[in-house]
Structures are given as C-alpha cells and as structure tokens.
Image (cartoon, rainbow, N blue to C red):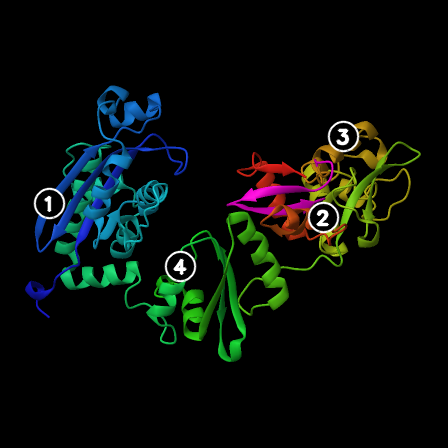
Amino acid sequence: MSQQTIQYPKLAFVDIETTGSHFERDRITEIGIKTLENDGVSIWERLIDPQIYIPQNIQRLTGISPQMVASQPTFEDLAKEIKEELEGKIFVAHNARFDYGFIKASLKRLGIDFKPKVLCTVKLSRLLFPNQSRHNLDTIIQSHGLVVSARHRALGDADLLLQFWQVCEKTVGKERLLEAINQLTGNASLPSNIDQELIDSIPDAPGCYIFYGENKSPLYIGKSISLRSRVLGHFQGSLTQRKEMKLSLQVRDIDWIETSGELGALILESQLIKERMPSMNIKLRRSKDLCAWSLEKSSAGILLPELVNQKDLLPGLQDNLYGLFYSKREAHSYLKAVAKKYRLCEVLLGLEKGAEGKPCFGYQLKQCGGACIGVMPTEMHNLQLQTAMSLYKVQVWPYKGPIAIDDGGEMIVLDNWCYLGTAINEDELSELKSIGDAEFDLDIYKIVKKALSGRYKNQVIRI
C-alpha cells in the first residue's frame, strides 16, 4: 500500500483548560480543537464561562482570568456545537482521560451521551518512542523540537499535539501510524472468539465483568467505573503484556453486572472472586482463620501481645485489636517484623523463649534494645510497641448501628464493617437494617474503611 493511498480517520486534536482537576466539581474554561481531515486542518476554539471561581494558581498557569470569561458563553450554550465538532472523529489528547473525561462529564450533566474513540498521545509516544525516558508534553516538545505558540492555552496545546502527530508520521510513516491508531483505540484487537457486537453491548458504566473460558469456566473477574473501556483495555494490552495476551487467547465469552457506583463494584468484585474462584485472579481469601493481636499488661507492667483467634474476634466492636491477619503464621511474621524494625525484645513479645535476667539472642545481635535485661526501661519498650502497633489498629465501628452509603443512587448498607446488601427503596433499606450479624470479611473491611475516610465520608446516611 503506498503512502499516498493511506487515509487516516478524521482526527480531532483536543485540549482544554479548566478550573481544576475534578470532573464533577471543576469546570471547563477553554476548548481548542484542531481537526485533521484529508490532509487539511480546521480549527475550533472557544473561551467558556465556567460559572465558578477560577483559582489564582490556575489563572497564573493559563493566563485565563475571570474577566476574560465573564462575557463568554457557558458550556451549556456551546454543548451542541462541541458535540457536532467532535462527532465522527477520533478524540486525540495528551493524558486523554483528563480532557475526554471533562468533556464527557460536562455533556452528561446535560443529558448528552458522548462515546468517541479516544487516542492518548502519551500512549502513542510510549508505543513509538519506547526509549524516551518520559512522555509528558514538555518532554515531547523538547525531544522533537516542537514550536510552542501558547503553552497552557487550549488551541496552543492542541497545535502541539498536531505537530507531534506530524513528527510521528515523518518518523515511522503513515502505515505504521495507522496501525498505532488501531492498536491504541481498540480496532482489530479483539480476540477471535469475541465479536464487536458483544463489546458494543457492554455499558460504559460501573460494575464487574467476568471473562469465561471453555465450558463457561471463569477465567478472570474485574471491576471498573467504565466497564466497556476496561474490557477493551485488556485486549489492547494483549498486544504488549503477556498476562493480557494469555487472557485474550483463552476468553470465549464475557458477562457483566452493573452497579450504581464504584463502591458497589469494589464490594461485588471481592464477593464474586471468592464465590467463583476464577483461574487468573490473585485469589482473595475467606476470613475463616482470621486473627489479630491485642495488647495486655502483665503483673510486671509489661505489655504483652496476645493472639485473638476467630472465635473470640469481634472486629468493629473490640477497641484493643491490631493487624487482622488471615493466619497465625502471618500474625507472627508481622510481629517479628515489628520487633526487628523497632528493636523490641522477642522474649518479652513471646516470640522466643529466654531465661529471666539474661539477654535474648536479639540483644547479642544488636537487634534488641535491651528491655530483657533492663537496659531499655519497660515503659520505653511498652511505648515503642504501642507506637508500632497503633499504625495497624483495627478501627472500632464509628457509628451507632448500621449506615447506608449513597453510591450513585443506590444505598449500600453496612454495619460493623460488614456488608449487609444494597437497597433501592425504603422497604429494602428497612429489611437490610434488621438482618443482624453478618460475616466479617477482611477485604470488604479494607474497602469500606478506605471509602469512609475518602470520597464517601460525606455520603453516609445513618439509619
């Protein structure tokens, strides 16, 4: 095929400026688009009134001030025009998830669906220039001698992407560049047993996906806030990653379960992996042999770690628990590591036998501070042990009874770190609230703890 007969699909080189980096909280202040079509270039550029404050550091970076956008149209005013400008084109951006994510979220707020094929120039740079140490835009400018017209302005940065594209074309040729488009946007990279119709039917919504092999045996279970994009990511990765290639060769079917939000997807993934035991997942373990350390003071005033086994364990209710481990062996390995790091005495911790008044083996190796022979005061040894263990303290359930977390419109019901279920109305909420004790699961504890200390902490409903 000659270089002259090769035609790219329409390419829209896009850059945006915003008031910050959060899709939901921040807003777009400028969009610049350079479209490459049949070797001709068209330009679309607009300043946008974000209708919220532009922080000073953003103003300094972009040069876009509140006065500049005060009389400009809002995103809602321009939404139809923006959609039409990008329709039928491959969306090309640097760190494309950012620019695409902002535009997609902004259109979604107006009830407009936006699902273009997306090409990230960071990934393109990594693919075509693998020996280049970094692939941020400033490095690309320097490495390829791009001409900067207006850095950190939308059209100026969009122009840099077009220049980079032209450098790629001169370096590797049109045919290789077309292959790169197909490789990075998912064209011609589906496994032989998976057709495009199945992929198109997967929603770009939160949830879990299941890859099946021969005889409907589960191969792999994963979760994502964008199911279709994540599934395609596996197959695109199969061209360069051994694990993804192995998965692509074995997959025969795909199923999925939608959730209303990210937290629901995380919990569902943990449950599904334990139930279905897919062959290519790192196995999540059930909590049947769960144990933890508690700290108890002896008659001599020495803090002693005591192992609390599954039958006596009440995570979320007991204040004096540290660690949470899947086995006694894991618990002892952790305590040994703590002793070594903080120069604690393994005899006093109950990890090794020793004679009273004689130095432990660790002291002879200078791995013990000498609490066993009084060189380190008991109070200091206790304090160091408490300090070390406090990093792994099991948090007591901070609510009086069960709670619900709003996760995209559905209520995830929890009590004492245990998942009770998901409710979509008051009746279901009331039913789940009265379930009583649920099985404690360490993986779900970690998921919920992280959620409640992060983005979900203000979405708690006490029930």
**Residue 414 highlighted magenta (yes or no):** yes
How far apart marks 4 and 3 lie (CA) works out to: 51 Å
Residue 286 percent coordinates (x, y):
69, 59
Q: Which residue is mark 2?
A: 324
Three-letter code for the amino acid on which mark 3 is drawn: Leu
Q: Which residues are magenta?
A: 398-416
Disc nearer the start of the sequence (3/1): 1
Residue 426 percent coordinates (x, y):
63, 46
Between 234 and 125, the residue placed more toward the observer is: 234
Q: Nearer the viewer, mark 2 or mark 1?
A: 1
Between 231 and 4, the residue placed more toward the observer is: 231
Residue 28 percent coordinates (x, y):
30, 34
Q: Nearer the viewer, mark 4 or mark 3?
A: 4
Element assignment for label 1? strand
Horizontal side of residue 50 vs 300, given as left or right = left
Q: Which residue is mark 3?
A: 383
**From this viewpoint, is residue 156 visible?**
no
Q: Which residue is mark 4?
A: 228
Q: Residue furthest front?
A: 427
Three-letter code for the amino acid on which mark 1 is drawn: Ser
Disc nearer the start of the sequence (4/1): 1
Horizontal side of residue 447 vs 165, given as left or right = right
Q: Which residue is mark 1?
A: 42
Element assignment for label 3? helix
